[in-house]
Image: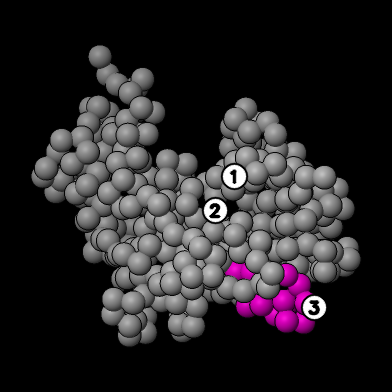
Amino acid sequence: MPKKALITGITGQDGYHLSELLNNKGYEVYGLIRGQQNPKLVRVEQEQPYIKLIEGDLTDQSSLVRSIEVSEPDEIYNLAAVSHVGYSFRNPILTAEVTGKGVLNLLEAIRVTGYANKVRFYQASTSEMFGGLDYNRPGKGYDENALFHPRSPYGVAKLYGHWITKNYRESYGMHASCGILFNHEGPRRGIEFVTRKISNAVARIHLGLQDHIELGNLDSKRDWGYAGDYVEGMWLMLQQEKPDDYVLATGETHSIQDYLELAFKEVGIENWHLYVKQNPKFLRPAEVDILLGNPEKAEKILGWKRKVDFEDLVSMMVKHDLELESPNKLT
């Protein structure tokens, strides 16, 4: 019998990559969706017809119980969240309900259905829990033992989800692991995220469809990897005999300016400053200046290592958006 996996956040970037990975491994894949109004649902139905969709919501525990009873999963991957940091400042209560309490709802649904000792659970934690502060290990980056200091409602909500997962692991013996993933991007990233915003704008500027891009802090540094590499790490965590928490990262950090330089260079533009304007509305109330991860534990225990480097990631995203936007080019 094939293994069964239930994925929340199935319509997001990671949900797309993970469902593809699991399908290729012979899994029966179930995806939780909030309803028929999600514009990404059409894409899932057209491009990934092998996914069995179940209606449910992280804020509605009864729907989560039903989804578990219907799918009878061997593995559950909780990828759903209000995941945009800027949006979380504008909608902190919703972020707390979905990104934080939603994890508790799902864990309780697992427990009350009798799956606590039957299913392996993955919680998508985030580098935003570190907050970029107390950065006292230059060159090494944050590992699983570093101090948390979230600097956004999103980071705070994710930290609750992280700790409640650890609590259920310790209290009920659940095989529950947290992946503390640093920024992972790709062509399937939403346009509202800065990397995709830049790659899409660069393509449109090159094609004559717009003349500039507006951004916030250009000095922020992030540890950027490719999402397709990171979902493999998620799967590897649930294949281990014992549950644990792991940092997935590249061990390198690059600034927004670095990303801009490479993206514009991809279309032959050297002086990117001419096309970039800073707009205060894109600044966070509390800024995270630098995030750098230390993936040594994941590399040693899971055998995981990123494959796509930063330069290839930027190139991949710009090329994708050039192809996407080319039909809109003005003649």
Quarter-wise, where is residue 119 in the image?
bottom right
Classify mark 2: helix, strand or loop: helix
Give percent across and percent down for residue 76. Answer: 71, 57
Mark 2 or 1, nearer chain start? 1
Question: Which range of residues does the magenta coloring cover?
Answer: 163-178
**Which residue in the structure is indicated by mark 3?**
172
Classify mark 3: helix, strand or loop: helix
Q: Which mark, by number, is residue 251?
A: none
Q: Nearer the viewer, residue 177 or 153?
A: 177
Q: For mark 3, does the 10 Å Cα neighbourhood hold few (<14), some (14 to 19), or many (20 or more) residues? A: few
Mark 3 or 2, nearer chain start? 3
Q: CA distance from mark 3 to mark 2?
A: 26 Å
Classify mark 1: helix, strand or loop: helix
Q: Amino acid at mark 2?
A: Val
Q: Residue at x 71, y 44 (%)?
A: 27
Q: Main secondary structure of the magenta part?
A: helix
Task: Mark 2 and mark 1 in contact? Answer it, CB < 8 Å.
Answer: yes
Mark 1 or 3, nearer chain start? 1
Give percent across and percent down for residue 7. Answer: 68, 51
Q: Amino acid at mark 1?
A: Leu
Q: Residue at x 73, y 57 (%)?
A: 75
Task: Mark 3 and mark 2 in contact? Answer it, CB < 8 Å.
Answer: no
Q: Which mark, by number, is residue 231?
A: 2
Asked if the stretch drawn in magenta spans residue 5, the answer is no
Q: Nearer the viewer, residue 75 or 236?
A: 236
**Which residue in the structure is indicated by mark 1?**
21
Q: Amino acid at mark 3?
A: Tyr
Q: Nearer the viewer, residue 82 or 117?
A: 117
Outermost residue to the left:
271
